[in-house]
Image (cartoon, coloured by chain):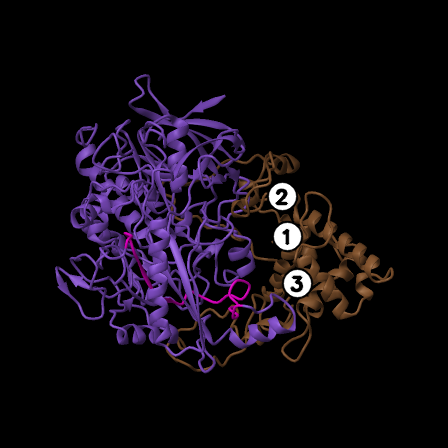
Chain colours: A brown, B purple
């Protein structure tokens, strides 16, 4: 969903600033009037595979931290590779660099007020700010608790203890933030990276789908729906095919 | 400046299920029809081809086909004395946008309501006495009977090609179908879908415990089907990417797969996309609409005059447009007077999860609506006398997919991350199944819609404010359903059975269903309903408001079949009655 080409449909649905930027006059399109179904070559927006090189949003230090966190949340073991090798940090970096990172599609008009948990997300701070703030807080507490060592230099059980504090909301963060909310966001995104289609940068070699026995994007299970209590025999497939792009 | 366009016979707000049905019916009548849709054009081949439609992140998690809150959202509070805050991201319910609306990403579960759901208040008070209902419950009769609506249910099911097994054909109960359903005149257009292992096991346990299971009616088709419009749908392939997704295989009924190919060929129909209706305009008497004002993607504003205005937006937007346009008296929860915004209702769902260690379910082999269900505890199919509550719901095992970002069942107490989490996730993914109850939600005096005093949309218009919470009656009902379901599941021999009853207060941060209802309710009396039995505004006779907004309360079923039937019913009333003599079809 990031770095998609700007298509006609984007322009039609786009904001006035996008329109001004590209100096294209958009008209609401009319369909019908006896013309039949419209067919526009490349009218849709296929996902583009991300380029795994480098970081678009994270500083190198932040990226190392997120890789470390991904490896604690999803440790390498006999079941699968770990979160870092699966590409979870790359995934999160690319998501944050896209619309998700800036909450572009959400309702972000003021006033912002603290609501009840049942009223859902109310923070004015978008995911980029949440990550930046959370990672800085985690690094600060690592140095304070563990004789000035960086989070990435800690032993796995030391990292786990800090992450558990964060998960419990016990980590000190600036006003307007919650360490539990930041942890939950990181957990959600790292799991997304591990379990999403590899086209977005994570789930290297379909590691998580193989672990689960999930068939992926195979589109036709008609020959297997009533084969009850039998293990599905085929390996998973992704949008880009079986091998990692 | 507002540009005035040439007049049309009919303007339709929103090109979704209801808008497309009305457009098709009224163009057949020879009327010149324009549909104005706030979202983009969407079609199967260009927007959700099988090559990249199965993308959980893009569609299910980031919600590509849903309304974006930045364009419009709603504010929410539980009670009138709370501060309503905006729903900044959609989680609890997922409004659609664009051509096809939420009918693009629905599951295809295609239920009829029970005959007693339509005369609910009369039925319950005559069976149990009027003191049986909670004092603040504001349920009403619909002003229409099941028998009146039956031919239109039939029309919608035959439009979709719905796959199912009839349970009641002209009053004769059919083995293997739902014995509780109202009589239907003919069988489903296509036979039921084949069932995976989980639903099959559930049906066996349901029979063993004295229940009557049947295949859930599904508009993901069991075989190829050509509908009465001449549009052909394909056989569902059980890809497991159904709800929250568009169907790339032309197997799930939607306006794309049933109506649009015919509609867009008609010279007397046009659709304008990325164009949002701001207001329904009225003449100097205030009793007649003159057309609609809308804004397009370039920011230009138009006035589209029309003789007839059909409001077919998402149900919350139907209510909002009526309030913004000043048609009908706004509901006042203190006096109980007024009608627009009254009786907002939802759906009470709950679940049961069963962990096995000796079974393989392949949960990803799925369609949006396959499954085996029972209806023994829906509506008034059982005696509520000893229960202390009214209402009910269907329940069973529907296998709708196990896409792994969202579906990774683990036993309670499992950590959310780390080695122990991973081991449990890998162990249980393929050997666990989940069951659900789909309960009614009756309406209450303090559950309603009005315009928010604080928060605005991109055009500066007030957002719709939802004031809503669960009530004891409905939570008791849901708890009862959950217990009944768990007792059947317990007969299946699982290693562990976990109940997840619905608990209050209502939480907008947890997905439940998109079955939001009410606000522009239908009824027999203009003092207590916003539209008459033909979905015609009591206050402006050339305005019809179609959708789940018309439900006076919600039954224990998915709403789409009833919404589609009401659309055909209203279209028929316009064609056979209104056009001959434009004016109120029912005297207030």
Residue appearing at x 28%, y 53% in the figure: B388
Q: Chain of mark 3?
A: A
- Structural distance between the alpha carbons of marks 1 and 3: 24 Å
Q: Nearer the viewer, residue B127 or B171?
A: B127
Residue hosting label 2: A123
In-image side of B223 versus B179 (left or right): right
Q: Looking at the image, tell me whether mark 1 or mark 3 is earlier in sequence order.
A: 1
CA gap, disc 3 to disc 2?
Answer: 28 Å
Q: Secondary structure at mark 3?
A: loop
**B33 above or below B376?**
above
Q: Which element is circle 2 on?
A: loop
The answer to if B479 sits in the magenta stretch is no
Marks 2 and 1, Cα distance to the nearest angstrom?
10 Å
* Cβ–Cβ under 8 Å for marks 2 and 1: yes
Q: Which residues are magenta?
A: B388-412
In this rendering, would B340 be left or right of A173? left
Q: Chain of mark 2?
A: A
Asked whether residue B495 is in view, the answer is yes
Q: Is residue B353 above or below residue B67?
A: below
Taking the view exactly as shown, the residue that stands out farthest to the top is B284
């Amino acid at each position: 969903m990031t770095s998609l080409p700007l298509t006609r449909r984007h322009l039609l649905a786009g904001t006035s600033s996008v329109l001004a930027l590209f100096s294209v006059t958009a008209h609401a399109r009319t369909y019908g009037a006896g013309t039949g179904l419209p067919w526009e070559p490349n009218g849709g927006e296929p996902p583009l595979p991300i380029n795994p090189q480098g970081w678009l949003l994270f500083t190198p230090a932040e990226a190392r931290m997120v890789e470390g966190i991904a490896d604690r949340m999803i440790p390498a073991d006999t079941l699968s590779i770990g979160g870092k090798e699966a590409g979870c940090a790359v995934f999160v970096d690319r998501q944050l660099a896209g619309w998700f990172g800036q909450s572009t599609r959400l309702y972000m008009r003021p006033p912002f007020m603290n609501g009840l948990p049942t009223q859902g997300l109310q923070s004015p701070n978008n995911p980029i700010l949440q990550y930046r703030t959370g990672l800085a807080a985690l690094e600060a507490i690592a140095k304070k608790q563990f004789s000035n060592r960086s989070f990435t230099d800690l032993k796995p059980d030391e990292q786990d203890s800090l992450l558990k504090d964060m998960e419990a909301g016990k980590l000190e963060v600036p006003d307007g933030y919650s360490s539990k909310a930041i942890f939950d966001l990181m957990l959600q995104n790292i799991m997304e990276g591990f379990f999403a289609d590899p086209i977005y940068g994570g789930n290297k070699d379909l590691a998580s789908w193989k672990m689960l026995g999930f068939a992926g994007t195979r589109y036709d299970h008609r020959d297997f729906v009533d084969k009850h209590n039998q293990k599905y025999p085929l390996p998973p497939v992704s949008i880009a095919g079986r091998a990692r792009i | 400046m507002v540009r005035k366009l040439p007049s049309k016979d009919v303007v339709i707000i929103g090109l979704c299920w209801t808008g497309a049905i009305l457009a098709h019916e009224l163009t057949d009548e020879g009327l010149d029809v324009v549909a104005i849709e706030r979202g983009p054009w969407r079609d199967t081949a260009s927007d959700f081809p099988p090559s990249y439609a199965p993308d959980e992140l893009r569609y299910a998690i980031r919600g590509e086909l849903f309304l974006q809150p930045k364009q419009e959202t709603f504010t929410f509070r539980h009670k009138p004395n709370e501060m309503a805050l905006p729903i900044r991201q959609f989680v609890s319910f997922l409004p659609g946008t664009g051509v096809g609306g939420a009918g693009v990403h629905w599951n295809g579960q295609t239920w009829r309501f029970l005959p007693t759901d339509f005369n609910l208040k009369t039925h319950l008070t005559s069976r149990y006495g009027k003191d049986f209902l909670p004092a603040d419950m504001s349920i009403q009769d619909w002003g229409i009977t099941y028998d009146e609506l039956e031919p239109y249910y039939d029309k919608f099911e035959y439009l979709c090609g719905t796959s199912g097994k009839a349970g009641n054909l002209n009053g004769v109960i059919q083995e293997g179908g739902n014995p509780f359903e109202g009589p239907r005149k003919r069988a489903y257009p296509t036979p039921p879908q084949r069932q995976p292992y989980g639903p099959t096991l559930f049906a066996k346990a349901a029979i063993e415990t004295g229940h009557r299971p049947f295949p859930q009616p599904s508009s993901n088709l069991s075989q190829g089907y050509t509908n009465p419009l001449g549009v052909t749908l394909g056989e569902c392939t059980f890809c497991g990417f159904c709800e929250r997704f568009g169907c790339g295989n032309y197997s799930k009924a939607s306006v794309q797969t049933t109506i649009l190919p015919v509609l867009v060929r008609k010279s007397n129909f046009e659709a304008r996309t990325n164009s949002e209706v701001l207001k329904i305009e009225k003449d100097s008497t205030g009793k007649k609409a003159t057309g609609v004002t809308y804004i397009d993607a370039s920011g230009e504003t138009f006035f589209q005059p029309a003789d007839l205005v059909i409001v077919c937006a998402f149900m919350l937007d139907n209510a909002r447009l009526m309030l913004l346009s000043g048609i009908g008296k706004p509901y006042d929860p203190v006096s109980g007077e007024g009608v627009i915004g009254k009786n907002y209702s939802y759906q009470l769902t709950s679940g049961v999860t069963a962990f096995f260690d000796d079974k393989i379910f392949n949960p990803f082999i799925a369609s949006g609506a396959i499954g085996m269900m029972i209806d023994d505890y829906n509506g008034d199919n059982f005696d509520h006398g000893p229960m202390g509550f009214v209402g009910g719901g269907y329940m069973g095992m529907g296998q709708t997919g196990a896409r792994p970002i969202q579906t990774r069942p683990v036993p309670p107490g499992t950590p959310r991350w780390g080695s122990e989490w991973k081991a449990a996730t890998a162990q249980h993914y393929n050997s666990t199944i989940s069951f659900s109850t789909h309960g009614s939600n009756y309406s209450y005096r303090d559950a309603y819609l009005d315009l928010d005093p604080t928060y605005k949309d991109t055009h500066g218009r007030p957002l719709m404010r939802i004031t809503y919470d669960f009530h004891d009656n409905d939570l008791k009902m849901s708890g009862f359903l959950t217990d009944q379901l768990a007792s059947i599941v317990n007969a299946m021999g699982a290693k562990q059975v976990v109940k997840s009853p619905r608990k209050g207060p209502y939480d907008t941060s947890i997905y439940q269903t998109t079955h939001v209802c009410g606000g522009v309710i239908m009824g027999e009396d203009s003092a207590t309903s916003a539209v008459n039995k033909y979905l015609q505004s009591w206050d402006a006779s050339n305005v019809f408001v179609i959708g789940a907004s018309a439900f006076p309360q919600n039954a224990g079923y998915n709403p789409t079949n009833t919404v589609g039937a009401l659309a055909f019913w209203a279209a028929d009333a316009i064609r056979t009655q209104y056009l001959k003599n434009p004016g109120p079809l029912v005297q207030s």
